[in-house]
């Protein structure tokens, strides 16, 4: 059995979703480990605050924001005011980097 030829991004051999994952991973490598973003916080009353994040986050990051908030009630709202993207916490990001994507394997 012949080994498959190496795939390139410009060819039709690589499935579409594999190309999407590859482009996203290349973009993450280009940006580095940090991504600046604008976070908005609105104080509703003395006990309540809203935190607006421009992206989707993992639950651990949302809970960390709530636990470190000085307000009794902190409501974290994601995917606000910018393009929706998923931002993992440091643990998930390092786990993802340590594993290969099954679509590219």
Image: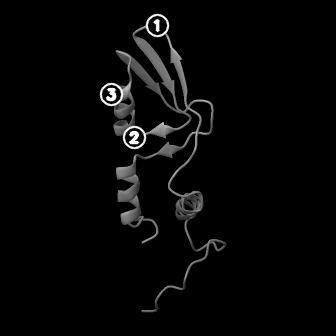
Total marks placed: 3
Q: Is residue 78 above or below residue 42?
A: below
The residue closer to the viewer here, 45 or 1, is: 45
Toward which corner of the image does residue 98 lie, by quadrant?
bottom left
User: SS at mark 1?
Assistant: loop
Q: Residue furthest bottom?
A: 1
Label 2 crowd bin: few (<14), some (14–19), many (20+), radius 10 Å: few
Relative placement, left or right, of 10 versus 70 is right
Q: Residue furthest front?
A: 70
Q: Earlier in the sequence, mark 2 or mark 1?
A: 1
Toward which corner of the image does residue 31 lie, by quadrant?
bottom right
Looking at the image, which residue is at 40% across and 67% down?
100
Residue that label 3 marks = 67
Residue 104, given in percent of the width and then of the height, sits at 46, 69
Residue that label 1 marks = 45
Q: Is residue 93 above or below residue 71?
A: below
Residue 60, given in percent of the width and then of the height, sits at 34, 38
Looking at the image, which residue is at 42% across and 92% down?
1
The residue closer to the viewer here, 20 or 36, is: 36
Relative placement, left or right, of 10 versus 13 is right
Marks 3 & 2, CB-CB < 8 Å contact = no
Query: Which mark is in front, 3 or 2?
Result: 3
């Amino acid at each position: 059995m012949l080994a498959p030829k190496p795939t390139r991004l410009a060819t039709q051999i690589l499935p579409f979703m594999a190309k999407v994952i590859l482009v996203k991973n290349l973009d993450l490598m280009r940006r580095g480990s940090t991504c600046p973003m604008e976070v908005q916080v609105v104080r509703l009353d003395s006990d309540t605050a809203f935190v607006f994040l421009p992206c989707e986050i993992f639950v651990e990051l949302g809970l960390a924001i709530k636990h470190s908030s000085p307000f009794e009630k902190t409501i974290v709202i994601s995917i606000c005011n910018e393009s929706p993207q998923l931002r993992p916490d440091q643990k998930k990001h390092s786990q993802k980097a340590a594993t290969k994507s099954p679509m590219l394997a």
